[in-house]
Amino acid sequence: MEASYQVLEQLYKKMLLGAPLESDSQKYAFYLNLPFSAQELSTSNFLKWPCVHHGNQASSVNMDAVSTPVTSINLKMNFQVNNPRDIMLLQLTVIKMMITKILSKKMEFGIKEKYSDIIEILLKPYELESKLITMFHGSDKLLSHMAAKCLASLLYLQLREKAVVNKTWTAFCLKTLSDYPESNTASYCLWILTAVIKEILKATCLQKAEILKQFLTSFDFLFEVFYCSVFSQHFENYEDTSLNPKITNFLICFLELLEILIASRIHLKLYLTCQRIFYLKIFCALDIITWPVHSLVKKKFIILIKRCLLHKVGEDVLNTSRSTLIEQDPYLDMDMLALGNAFLQAVNLGWLKQLSVTGKPSHFGGNEVQPGNKSVVVPDLIVVRASSLVLLKSLEIKVDNCMSANEVKAELQKFMSELLTFLKQHLHSSLKLHHHCEWLPKIFIEQDDDMLEAAKASLSIYLKLTRAWNEAAKGMTQEKETWDHQTHENGFNPHCIFLFLLKNIGFDATVLLDFLISSETCFLEYFVRYLKLLQGERNNFSKVCKLFDTTELRDEVYISSIVTSHVEERSSNQATHQPLFCGTNYYALLPLASDPTTSGTNMEQKDNQTVKSKQPNFVIGIDNTSSSGTSQSLVDYDSSEDSEEESVEECLSNIKQTPLNHQVITRIRETVSVTGKKNQSYLASTTGEKNQSYLASTARLLDPKESSTLSSFGCEAASQSIASQTVISCKTFKCLKELEKAISRLHRRHLFPYNPSALLKLLKHIDTINKNK
């Protein structure tokens, strides 16, 4: 056994150096042969294993025939020469490396040919694939895992070099899938399938689609039966199923296989049953959230549904841009509709009520709570975001495919009500909703890409139903007001969502600019659609801005009540009994203000950017300065030249077809940041004065002697103060104007990554409408 180890070690070192192998291929294959049976692989028989080879056999191979400085490599191996397990691990490592060298384009042809001869000998006389499959039945997980890696590489090698599917593997795979759940090797089978498909997708050859089709066709007809059998198992007979690593590993391997199958469908335009089954048979799989399995499995399942609906399946595995995922697929619309309808049907049957989103508390440096420490259990926001986005995208798909918007009006109200109830039930105190439309930016604040996908889906629903509603209302004011009220009540009013988005970023135009130059989100598509909507709904936008301003004023009075104890008591009583909004019942149904029952501590914990931006004059109700650190123009933008007319569709196509240059993006951000530093001194000098005047005006406003007319501060006074000016509106249009100047300046310098002519045209038109209003 010692001689066998020495030979394998020398071979390993030669492969690392890329040195040629002078000895006969048969002799190398002799030492790489795996002689162990399944019974001998059991842990209890390790010490009873015979020596792999005898010393006289080792002398027949002269490994020193080539003068190669192999001693210069210090491998620092911890192998035990008398342990057959370590010898076998070394054999598997050398075989895996040899296959990798064959697949590499950098290897010399002669050396690659030698390696190929050795692998051929291992396959035919020694039946390498059969011995690797046999190892899956052993109890040693490391040996089984190494065997799976070797077999996956071997299968891909045969597919790429000879376009042949291994018959031994095919028979094993079919038997494993058909014998489920009695089979104990299903996890290895699924893992190997996933690994081979990934390698095919990553390959640069032009015949990827043909190779993958040949690989999948052999078990495609059986996969549907296997899929249904997996999701018909509830694992009730297992003890501690949620912590059972065997069950968890199997389900995770299965979900990863489903994801890579869907990704292969999108990238290679194949439409086999195994690639469509998740869309068509999703309903039977949705019960997984009630199974006694690990929470990681449920989370991975929900995220997979989200990626399917967003056409983002396989992005993290294949490192591809979003535009390449959207290809012409004759079955995709039908499958997406089936997926969305199945999910909505499950929600209608109480799926959200059965979904557990209680996350485990995080403990720094450990997984247990120390004595005396109280740990707050917060909801798993990853599950909350994914479930909410899946519901919203499913509604969007159903609305887009419905003949009439009135057909889904009742269902829309039902599902959005179900979603809002679900969110209110699970969100902790710091995320409590005070406005139905606030749910979207609040729960997605840590995930920009999902937030913008949700905003785009919500806007799409609004546009489709608004067109149908306007046609049905035929100009009736009451009907339109009813529809506007329902958009707020159901939490998808686009103007509220856009304003909450701007508030969360402090009305910072540079953040919007960063979204526009990034291909990681769909902000450009959402932004263009919203600007087009804003052109036609300027009055609705103004109404929403007035409601925001009313609440801003009331909140600031409430927050500023800490100036004196006398004022605190008086302001607190007024805020408690004051209606949320003035005017009609339509306004009263928009609880934009903070909950009066919220403690003062929670009020002080509001977003810093939003609180700092609230510095209006209470008497006039208008902000003469900007809202945040970006109040002063970061760049002294010049007026841009008239850009050529271009359709919005062309603008959107430009961003999808033009890959972003990271050097260009870096130059953009450097241009903005350098100029921004020039304004820091000015901002620093003026911040203190603003804060002093702000507190002084607040104290005067709350002093009974100086503000008798505002002592009650009712709805009528608030309405009159914002009738002529709207703070939120001014901030919004100022932010859009700054964004227009930034884009124009960068476009003139050829620093913008795509042609923004259509976008600039929209922004200029919005600015013109605002000035003429």
Image: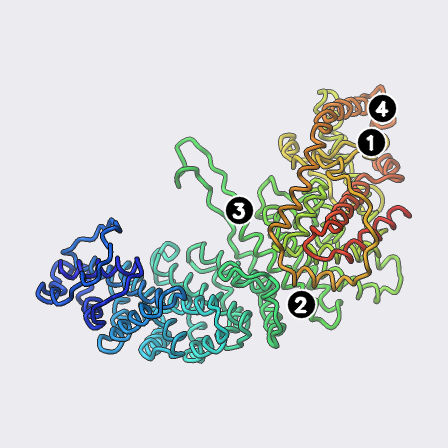
Residue 698 location, x and y as percent? 78, 25
Asked if the residues shown at circle 4 and circle 1 are in contact, with their CB atoms under 8 angstroms apart, the answer is: no
> For residue 713, which numbered disc appears in the image?
1
Choose between 479 and 688: the one closer to the eye.
688
- At x 43%, y 65%, the residue is 254
| Distance from the alpha carbon under mark 3 to that under mark 1 | 38 Å
| Distance from the alpha carbon under mark 4 to that under mark 1 | 10 Å
Q: Which residue is mark 2?
A: 398
Q: Which quarter of the picture shows residue 331?
A: bottom right
Say which amino acid is labelled 1.
Phe
Q: Which badge, 3 or 1, is on the more N-terminal residue?
A: 3
> For residue 379, which numbered disc appears in the image?
3
Say which amino acid is labelled 3.
Pro
Q: Is residue 146 left or right of residue 668?
A: left
Q: Which badge, 4 or 3, is on the more N-terminal residue?
A: 3
Residue 569 location, x and y as percent? 72, 24
| Distance from the alpha carbon under mark 2 to that under mark 1 | 46 Å
Say which amino acid is labelled 2.
Lys
Asked if the residues shown at circle 2 and circle 1 are in contact, with their CB atoms under 8 angstroms apart, the answer is: no
| Distance from the alpha carbon under mark 4 to that under mark 3 | 45 Å
Residue 122 location, x and y as percent? 25, 73
Say which amino acid is labelled 4.
Ser
Q: Which quarter of the picture shows residue 659?
A: bottom right
Choose between 586 and 430: the one closer to the eye.
430
Q: Which residue is mark 4?
A: 707
Q: Which badge, 2 or 1, is on the more N-terminal residue?
A: 2
Task: Determine crowd level at label 2: few under 14, some 14-19, many 20+ residues with C-alpha closer than 10 A.
Answer: many
Q: Is residue 434 above or below residue 289?
A: above
Q: Which badge, 2 or 4, is on the more N-terminal residue?
A: 2
Q: Is residue 54 left or right of residue 471?
A: left
Q: Is residue 356 left or right of residue 242?
A: right
Task: Determine crowd level at label 1: few under 14, some 14-19, many 20+ residues with C-alpha closer than 10 A.
Answer: some
